[in-house]
Amino acid sequence: MLLDRGFRDVLPKIESLGIHTFMPQFMSKDQKQLTTEQANASRKVTMGRFVVETVNGRLKNVFR
């Protein structure tokens, strides 16, 4: 399941149901930037979410 950052509070509940989730990475307060692995993982999630949002936009235009 692709999630945005608004779902971070319910993430443990979703994962306890056995659903595998993907969400952009967060930086801790002492970090200035993400590690290479974290940045790449965050980009992958963003690319997937972009596709989903594009299809949602097209559907909204077709079925007004």
Image: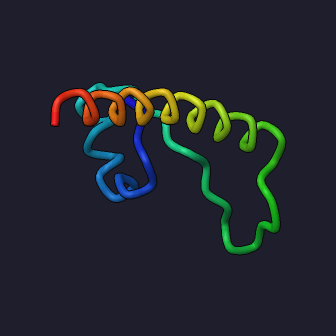
Image quadrant in which you'd find residue 52 = top left
Image quadrant in which you'd find residue 55 = top left
What residue is at 59 percent from the left and 31 percent from the top? 47
* Number of numbered discs overlaid on the protein picture: 0
What residue is at 63 percent from the left and 30 percent from the top? 44
Residue 21, compared with residue 9, is above or below; it is above
- Quadrant occupied by the N terminus: top left
Left or right? Give the position of 13 relative to 41: left
Provide residue 46's location: percent of width, then percent of height. Answer: 58, 38
Which residue is nearer to you in this view: 45 or 13?
45
Which residue is nearer to you in this view: 29 or 60?
60
- Quadrant occupied by the C terminus: top left
What kind of colouring is applied to the model shown? rainbow
Left or right? Give the position of 6 relative to 62: right
Residue 54, compared with residue 12, is above or below; it is above
Provide residue 19's location: percent of width, then percent of height. Answer: 31, 27
What residue is at 27 percent from the left and 28 percent from the top? 59
Residue 36, compared with residue 55, is above or below; it is below
Provide residue 51's location: percent of width, then percent of height. Answer: 49, 27
What residue is at 42 percent from the left and 36 percent from the top? 53
Provide residue 56's location: percent of width, then percent of height. Answer: 33, 32
Which residue is nearer to you in this view: 5 or 63?
63
Q: Residue furthest left?
A: 64
Residue 37, compared with residue 55, is above or below; it is below
